[in-house]
Image: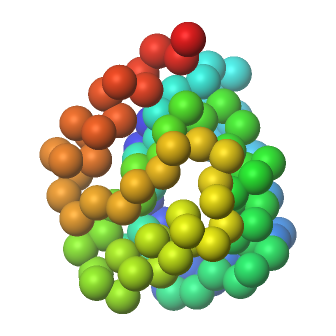
Amino acid sequence: MYGKYKPGLVIDLEVAKQIVSDRLKISHGVTRPFLIEVTGLLCIDSEGRNYLAGPGCDLITAGAILTNNKLLAFVGNAFILLDKPLIPSKVFSTEESAVRWLEPFKFPN
């Protein structure tokens, strides 16, 4: 599954819940890996981060965070380190490397 944040997006708890709700509708109850391009992200608060790292991981086997922005890559790595998502997560600068890393997570055991 692939997602992309809109330019200038600010994520708080309410927005995080809406993002997850939309993703769950699109997934049709199928668990799969998720690649999210965060280049358009402007800001995310701690409640939004905590939700995305916990309940927001529902129906995701692994999460690849994609950005070519060094500041957002730092934020993504801090999210992984501090918020400790419930799924394997990693930051990437190219879509090809992210997709390659997600490959083993396609079919959950």
- The quadrant the N terminus occupies is top left
Q: How many marks?
A: 0
Residue 97 lies left or right of residue 39; in this view the side is: left
Residue furthest front in the image: 81
Residue 81 in the image: above or below residue 2: below
Can residue 7 be seen here?
no
From the viewer's side, name the closer residue of 59 and 24: 59
Asked where in the image residue 47 lies, by quadrant, the reply is bottom right
Q: Position of residue 54 (x, y in %)?
A: 76, 52
Residue visible at 48% across and 80% down in the picture: 75
Point out residue 52 in the picture as x, y percentages from the top left corner.
69, 59
- Which of these two is toward me, 82 or 61? 82
Q: Residue at x 52, y 76 (%)?
A: 78
Vertical placement of residue 11 versus 106, above or below: below
Q: Quick one: 92 or 2, which is closer to the camera? A: 92
In the picture, measured across the screen, residue 18 lies left or right of residue 71, that is right
Q: Is residue 69 visible?
A: yes
Is 10 on the left-hand or right-hand side of 1? right
Q: Quadrant of residue 46?
A: bottom right
> Which residue is at a point 55% across and 68% down the rendered structure image?
81
Residue 70: percent from left, percent from top: 28, 84
Q: Is residue 107 above or below residue 65?
A: above
Q: Quadrant of residue 19?
A: bottom right
Q: Residue at x 40, y 81 (%)?
A: 74
Q: Position of residue 108 (x, y in %)?
A: 53, 17
Which image quadrant: the C terminus? Answer: top right
- 12 shown above or below 38: below
